[in-house]
């Protein structure tokens, strides 16, 4: 499992997450060399202090979680606050409701605005798709829009829906995203061999709630 640690980011955005669980994840990040941790916006300032200003691990947080249908201005405010609190990476949830309606053209504009805001602070921007809700054409459209906006990573799910991990679908998602853009896969429930298969397929980040004992 050790060889997978640099790819793993601990995701701590479930509604019942506790402070002790987050400290356990922090220990894993600092002692095992995990890629980083993703916390709720409420916790960013605290864990930036705990992690320190110079630690190489990513401290990410979510914006527009879990459904993405907040106003763009609200997402912009969330990003500004998160960056001020010390987040080194922002994960923006796609407005799926807009995609399913006549407002779908707004998604491209919103992504361009939000990614630009993050990049002005020289931080990383991720777009989260709830890919299980999208058909192939919608998935490809949004990946293109995110790529055109200059996003650093595309993530295949929020993790908020209780879906089983399916390796074939995860690998297929990687093939849809240009190699110039990183991919994060929500891999809760994946075995070690499945995690290895994701890395071999070119997935840069494995987002999981808990590491294997």
Image (cartoon, rainbow, N blue to C red):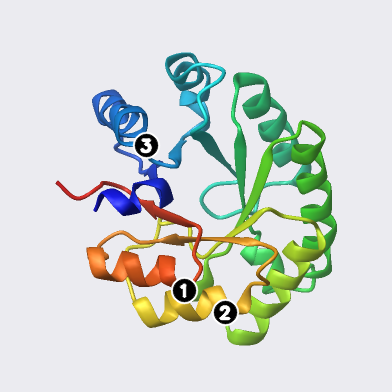
Q: Residue furthest left?
A: 213
Label located before the other in sequence (1 or 3): 3
CA gap between label 2 and label 3 equals: 27 Å
**Which numbered disc covers residue 201?**
1
- x and y, in percent, of residue 77 in the image: 72, 31
Q: Residue furthest bottom?
A: 136
Q: Please say if the residues under marks 1 and 2 sit with CB atoms less than 8 Å apart.
A: yes
Q: Which residue is mark 2?
A: 175
Q: Is residue 78 visible?
A: yes
Q: SS class of the residue under badge 2? A: helix
Task: State the separation of the CA atoms marked 1 and 3.
Answer: 22 Å
How far from the left and from the top, in percent, is residue 84? 67, 20
Q: Nearer the viewer, residue 175 or 142?
A: 175
Question: Closer to us: mark 2 or mark 3?
Answer: 3
Check disc 2: other Cα within 10 Å, few if <14, some if 14-19, many if 20+. some
Q: Residue at image x 51%, y 58%?
A: 204
Q: Secondary structure at mark 3?
A: loop
Tell me which residue sits at (35%, 40%) in the image: 15
Residue 2 spot, x, y in % from top left: 27, 48
Residue 164 shows in the view: no
Q: Nearer the viewer, residue 136 or 55?
A: 55
Q: Earlier in the sequence, mark 1 or mark 2?
A: 2
SS state under label 1: loop
Q: What is the number of the mark on residue 110?
A: none
Q: Which residue is mark 3?
A: 33
Would you say 172 lies left or right of 2 here?
A: right
Instruction: Write the residue at 60% across / 22% down.
Output: 86
Q: Residue 124, percent across and down?
A: 66, 42
**Disc 1 vs disc 2: which is toward the camera?**
1
Q: Is residue 130 above or below residue 88?
A: below
């Amino acid at each position: 499992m050790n060889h997978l640690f640099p790819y793993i980011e601990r995701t701590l955005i479930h509604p019942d997450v506790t402070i002790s669980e987050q400290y356990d994840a922090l220990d894993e990040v600092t002692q095992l060399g995990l890629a980083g941790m993703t916390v709720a916006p409420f916790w960013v300032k605290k864990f930036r202090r705990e992690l320190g200003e110079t630690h190489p691990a990513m401290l990410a947080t979510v914006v527009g979680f879990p459904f993405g249908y907040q106003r763009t201005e609200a997402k912009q405010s969330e990003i500004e606050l998160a960056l001020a609190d010390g987040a080194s990476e922002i994960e923006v949830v796609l407005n799926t409701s807009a995609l399913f309606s006549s407002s779908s053209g707004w998604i491209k504009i919103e992504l361009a605005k939000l990614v630009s805001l993050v990049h002005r602070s020289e931080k990383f921007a991720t777009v989260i798709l709830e890919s299980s809700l999208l058909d192939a054409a919608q998935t490809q459209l949004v990946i293109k829009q995110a790529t055109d906006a200059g996003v650093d990573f595309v993530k295949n799910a929020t993790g908020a829906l209780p879906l089983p991990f399916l390796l074939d679908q995860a690998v297929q998602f990687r093939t849809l995203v240009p190699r110039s853009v990183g991919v994060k896969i929500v891999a809760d429930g994946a075995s070690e061999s499945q995690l290895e298969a994701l890395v071999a397929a070119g997935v840069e980040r494995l987002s999981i709630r808990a590491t294997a004992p």
